[in-house]
Amino acid sequence: MPVTLNRIAKEGANGPAMMPIIQGVGRAGIEISALLRGAVFRGALGVAGSENVQGEQQQKIDILSDEIFLDEMRSTGHVCAVGSEEQEELLMIDEYSHSDWVVLVDPLDGSSNLDIDGPVGTIFSVVKRKTASSEMPHVSDTLQSGREVVAAGYVLFGPSLMLVCSVGEGVHGYTFNPNSARFELSHPDMSIPATGGYYSVNESNADKWLDGMGSKLEALKESSGLGMRYVGSMVADMHRTLLKGGIFLYPADEKNSTGKLRLLYEAIPMGYLIENAGGKASCSADLAILDVEPEGLHQRVPVYLGSTSAVEKLLG
Ligand code: AHG
Ligand code: MN
Ligand code: MN
């Protein structure tokens, strides 16, 4: 019998509570995947004409994916609030406002790839609320460091549909099997290769990077001989980094002086997965992504994620 997402219930202290939430992520993934496949026929591609709180153009599919994800979190019956990259404020789930769990999400990551039928993803993490269950959840419930995360993962919409997640006991990859219509365990106990792989970065920004990153990357390239790959979709770039090793980075630059990627929706979930897979996740030489104390829902940080040796070689 194939192993399905039910297995999560047997994984450590957090597994039983996280299973229904991750199953909800799986259902959202199936629905978003159907939306993506039919988008060109339904006029659902293209910009929505609105901006998100970060001043970025929203695509129609960004908004629809956000609605699907929120709906599936509501239907788990275990989530009291969702913080989303596409929403300025924390979204309350009134019916279940007494529940313990708060979910953070980037509903559609890499949406600039939609126009060219390139890979995109969904990234999520789960924390336990700090406020009493008798109160309404509060934005402070989301502002917890990566050390408090109890589950995180991503869905990759590529040639196959994959859900990669961790509840703190290893990282496991499930692939959607169209014949059984279920996610089945295909990549148990994922661990990032210690050597080899690729460096992955938007190198066209190199002359604008801060922190001397231009010369540091040159030194890494020379000493490691790593090849280069970059999709511009963090989920796709991180999935390759997790499987093949190397490093993914998005440094601070003159335009994005604290980095481009979002701490709560992108950096922490990916940092949690990479640490659980035996790699290293840093904001700088002496600061782990998971040690950053969040100050705001939409805060951004520089990210360096990958094989421990590559991250240490780059940052020194
Ligand atoms: P999103 O589509 O959720 O806004 O995220 C885009 C992010 C991330 O997926 C990717 O790593 C990065 O932006 C790409 O940025 P550049 O186009 O600046 O390289
Ligand atoms: Mn993103
Ligand atoms: Mn997004």
Image (tube, helix red, strand yellow):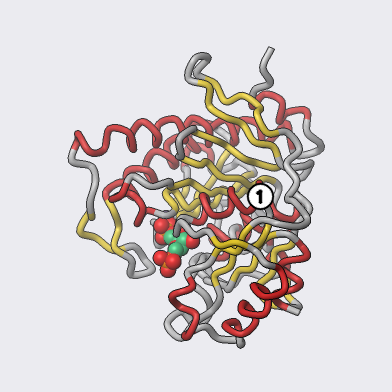
Of 97 and 85, the residue lying toward us: 85
Q: Secondary structure at mark 1?
A: helix
Of 255 and 5, the residue lying toward us: 255
Q: Is residue 90 visible?
A: no
Q: Which residue is mark 1?
A: 244
Q: Tell me residue 86's x, y (percent).
A: 39, 56
Q: Tell me residue 197's x, y (percent).
A: 66, 56
Q: Quadrant of the C terminus?
A: bottom right
Q: Residues within 10 Å of mark 1 (few under 14, many from 20)?
A: some
* 316 lies above or below 267: below
Q: Tell me residue 313's x, y (percent).
A: 75, 73
Q: Amino acid at mark 1?
A: Lys
Farthest top residue in view: 1
Q: Quadrant of the N terminus?
A: top right
Residue at the image position 28 percent from the left and 50 percent from the top = 115
Farthest right residue in view: 12
Residue at the image position 66 percent from the left and 27 percent from the top = 185
Q: Tell me residue 181's x, y (percent).
A: 50, 18
Side of 121 where 238 appears, left or right: right
Of 159 and 48, the residue lying toward us: 159
Residue at the image position 44 percent from the left and 40 percent from the top = 69
Residue at the image position 26 percent from the left and 38 percent from the top = 39
